[in-house]
Amino acid sequence: NAGVTQTPKFQVLKTGQSMTLQCAQDMNHNSMYWYRQDPGMGLRLIYYSASEGTTDKGEVPNGYNVSRLNKREFSLRLESAAPSQTSVYFCASSEALGPTEAFFGQGTRLTVV
Amino acid sequence: GQSLEQPSEVTAVEGAIVQINCTYQTSGFYGLSWYQQHDGGAPTFLSYNGLDGLEETGRFSSFLSRSDSYGYLLLQELQMKDSASYFCAVRVINTGKLIFGQGTTLQVKP
């Protein structure tokens, strides 16, 4: 019963490097989300995908791109990493619009030096 | 836009009752949810209020008043394991966007 799986769990990047964070869910959920969490800032929405084939900006999209590869997978790309992108990144999924519970992956701890 | 405000920290003693408030500004949403996150872990769902009033789940209760743009999470018979961060969240109508408050860190002392 995997739920939401994120890879990698830890990553260190140099400024200017690129990388893709992977997220997959096995619950047949329509909606998927990427958040970043910084101390004292809560969970801030980067991008979300309400359904397969659609993606939309959240609160803090600058410096990121996303791809909803299929219903299961939603990836987050940093094209040119900056120290300000040092954070913990969480992927989440939920069934659909409306009052449904969101399930989170275990997070990716990213440090940009 | 949408925003949710919570106190940053709350401290209480084991066995006590604590209330964590959430005030929000959002044009339309399906309901107010609460999530718990232990240090180093992922957020997990606790409760949901779709309608005004009180919802009870064991030691935890949650309340929503749409007319006051206000909700709260009530934790009773506090245990040490309740030390964690608690987030309120709303799903914005017709967009699928799920927005979280900044979180309240609860410290339970012996």
Image: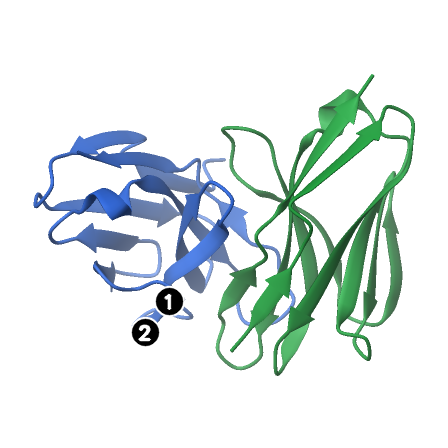
Report the disc number at residue A54.
Answer: 2
User: Marks 2 and 1, how far apart in space?
Assistant: 5 Å
Q: How many marks?
A: 2
- Pointers 2 and 1 within a single chain: yes
Query: As shown in the figure, which amino acid type bears the numbered disc 2?
Result: Thr
What residue is disc 1 on?
A49
Q: Which x, y percent locates residue A109? A: 33, 34
Q: Residues within 10 Å of mark 1 (few under 14, many from 20)?
A: many
The part of the image, by quadrant, that contains residue A4 is: top left
Q: Residues within 10 Å of mark 2 (few under 14, many from 20)?
A: few
Residue at image coords 20%, 53%: A77
Colour displayed for chain B in the image of the structure: green
Q: Mark 1: which secondary structure?
A: strand
The answer to which of A98 and B63 lies nearer the viewer is B63
Q: Are marks 2 and 1 in contact (CB under 8 Å)?
A: yes
Disc 2 is attached to a residue of which chain?
Answer: A
Rendering colour mode: by chain
Q: In the shown orientation, is residue B51 left or right of residue A15?
A: right
Q: Residue furthest top?
A: B110
